Image (cartoon, rainbow, N blue to C red):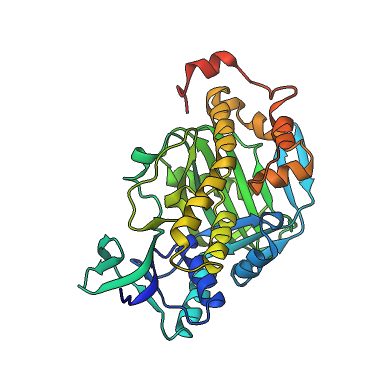
Amino acid sequence: MNHDFDYVLLGGGLANGLIALALLARHPTPRVALIEQGSTVGGNHTWSFHESDLRPTERELVEPLVRRRWPSYDVFFPSRERRISRGYAACDGSRLHRVVTERFARAAASELLLESRVEIAEGNAVQLCDGRVLRAEVVLDGRGLGSSDLPVVHRGGYQKFLGLELELDDVSSSAVPVLMDARVAQTDGYRFVYVLPFSKTRVLVEDTYYSLAPELDRERARSRVLEFAESRGYRVSSVIREEHGVLPIPTHSTSAPSSAGIPVGMRAGWFHPTTGYSLPTAARFAERCAQCSAADLPQIAREFSRKHEQQAGFARFLNRLLFRAFAPSDRRHVMERFYGLPEDVIARFYAMQSTALDRAQILFGRPPRGFSIGQMLLGDAAT
């Protein structure tokens, strides 16, 4: 069969953006089409990762997208404050869009199709709303999980967040990111604030909830972000941008939604079930795509899913404990205990590379305050 392209990528999110970058960089004469219904690749998102999450080739792939790096990060709980001496980094959608656009512009046989909607995707053919038909040796479906998909494929809770990037009047004294500040009021499940200081006068503050309810009160979350900023002494000059989202935090294994071709990224369930981080997994699979032929990719994807599931099952078990064995107001004690573990154990858990000994250290010992077998038997009765 003659193909217009070797690869057609549906959706211009993080997963397909990284796959496109890997293919365009590693293949001698790549023929890649990326179709995105929006006007940009990546959207208005921030993706973060721990330096230990990625192998050297994966870090090389992600490097052009990195907005800021830090050598350590802090966590705060009512009875624990700790600085973790591990590298942390953040990327954003604007950089992903710029880099992907530049790479496609240099690839004569490839095509970036923005503001293009898929009408039909069957087998190796994709028809756009304008009537154009693209044929490929392999189609990768990275269109994410829409609100209509979640009830079908998801059992568990949600991580929902709203972040404001703030311009400050004064220089901020904080130069270290805060991954969790759980000293805030515990409402709507487990709540914490996430802080990324991009510069001395620019900071991203996110109000985050682990809840059984997917609804996010955006107006209230905005107010809480600004209240938190004021409580930390930030003098806010202006709000530069806003981002928000609702991510699945699964407690059980579920089937993926129907897909055209090979599902990838969030659509394939390739994210950390407990933390919601998706960049490390996306970078790993992008590298695997660049190391094999298009014909071998279906088998590579199946093997990748199998290995991912080996770690994901343990994370989903921890999610069941979080949501079912603790009342909402006590869930922060679970993370408080977790951050008392050795740094290597914490790093491997984030990277989805926990060993059997790591799992034993996470599970055994004195349980976090608030653990209740009775609460667990009640099931998912409260947010």
Residue nearest the viewer, comparing 182 with 323:
323
Residue 382, position as x, y percentages in the image:
47, 24
Instruction: Decide: is 274 above or below 363.
Output: below
Residue 375, position as x, y percentages in the image:
54, 17
Instruction: Decide: is 35 above or below 159.
Output: below
Residue 327, position as x, y percentages in the image:
56, 23
Residue 78 showing in the rendered view? no
Residue 377, position as x, y percentages in the image:
51, 15
Residue 155 showing in the rendered view? yes
Residue nearest the viewer, comparing 121 with 301:
301
* Residue in the image at 56% along x and 31% along y: 317
Instruction: Decide: is 296 above or below 270.
Output: below
* Residue in the image at 31% along x and 77% along y: 2
* Residue in the image at 34% along x and 39% along y: 152
Residue 186 sits in quarter: top right
Q: How many marks overall?
A: 0
Q: Quadrant of the N terminus?
A: bottom left
Answer with left or right where residue 132 lies relative to residue 197.
left
Residue nearest the viewer, comparing 97 with 56:
56
Answer with left or right where residue 209 lies relative to residue 59.
left
Instruction: Decide: is 58 above or below 78.
Output: below
* Residue in the image at 58% along x and 41% along y: 310
